[in-house]
Image: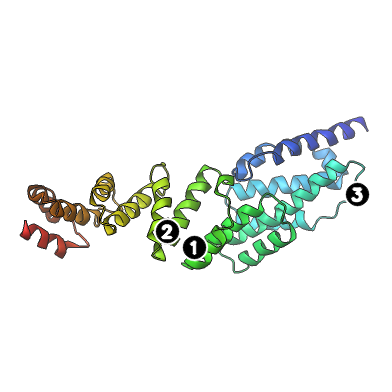
Amino acid sequence: MNYSCGLHFYVIAILAELLSLPIMMKVKYVVFFLPAFTVSALYAQQNPAGQVYQIYHSATELLDKGKYTAAAEQFRLVEASQVKPSTQPDFETSVSLLKENSQYYEAFCALELGNDDAESLFLRFIKEHPENPLTKLAYFQIGSSYFKQAKYQDALRWFDKVEASELNGRENTEYKFRKGYAYFSLNDYKNAQLLFSEVKTRKSPYTEDATYYFAYIAYLNQDYHLALTNFERLKNSKKYEESYPYYITAVYFLDKRYDDVLSYAIPILNSTHQKNETEMLRIVAAS
């Protein structure tokens, strides 16, 4: 009896620490704070609430490994679980919160799997649990779903509900790039460039993309020095090696740096395929 009671409070302490984590932290860090499951198998067998914690722990491990179908099944079990009222209010509240969070992660799994019901699952979560900290992340996930479908106006509608300060570093960068690209696609270059300017200074999978689009907008705005500075940062980029040289060549020409046009453009034209090859040849001929 004393062991059961002590473990009861131990699990509460673990959950308190878990629930105090930043809401955007990766699932693998969430899993880290659930050691009670591995040391309390006997207790879990004797207590339905303990079984709920074990299932949730298993679900988060599967989620962290990218096994979204299996994880979703486990999260649904947590959400559907029926636990009798406890004499420990804090413990009961923690179980309820796990059930709420399971609803969110079930929707997240559906999104990663490309299921058609992902948005409706997120909307149900937002409607039923508006005070849950994960609600803000749900807005981001719905926006990302629309973004992947190139429905940029709809994506922005949901991105606008997100508090960027509540996102962790990786998700904050992803959010700002996607929102910036959505603006860019809708020809709102001012707002797009503001977001790209933040993303391009961070080392991430979006650094090159943000730098390219920032420079391109600067070029459109005839801010050629700013455009050149940023296009030159792409000189080792494989992704944009067929496009950025044209803009560097054009800026050299507009700045009447004709020797630079020839020394820069001719070797590139001789060694690579350029999307704007015809225009580059014209600039070379005019130099």
Identity of the amino acid at label 3? Answer: Pro
Asked if disc 1 and disc 2 are in contact, CB closer than 8 Å, the reply is: yes
Q: Residue 13, located in which quarter of the rendered image?
A: top right
Classed neighbour count for the residue bearing mark 2: other residues with Cα under 10 Å, few (<14), some (14–19), many (≥20): many
Q: Amino acid at mark 2?
A: Tyr
Q: In which quadrant is the N terminus drawn?
A: top right
Badge 1 amino acid: Phe
Q: On the rendered structure, is 194 left or right of 269? A: right
Q: Is residue 235 left or right of residue 202?
A: left
Which callout, 3 or 1, points to the residue nearer the camera? 1
Residue shown at the point (20%, 59%) measured from the top left: 274
Residue 283 percent coordinates (x, y): 11, 59
Q: Is residue 222 above or below residue 50?
A: below
Earlier-in-chain disc, 1 versus 2: 1
Q: Nearer the viewer, mark 3 or mark 2?
A: 2
Q: Quadrant of the C terminus?
A: bottom left
Per the rendering, the mark at residue 181 is 2
Q: Residue at x 40, y 62 (%)?
A: 188
**Count of marks overlaid on the render:** 3
State the image coordinates of residue 116 (x, y, percent, origin top left).
59, 69
Q: Disc 3 to disc 2, how far (Cα)? A: 49 Å
Q: Mark 3 highlights which residue?
A: 85
Residue 49 on image: x %, y %: 83, 46
Q: Residue at x 10, y 53 (%)?
A: 266
Disc 3 and disc 1 in contact, CB within 8 angstroms: no
The residue under label 1 is: 147
Tell me the mark number nearer the camera, choosing from 1 and 2. 2
Write the residue at 55% across / 43% down: 168
Within 10 Å of disc 1 (Cα), the crowding (few <14, some 14-19, many 20+) is many
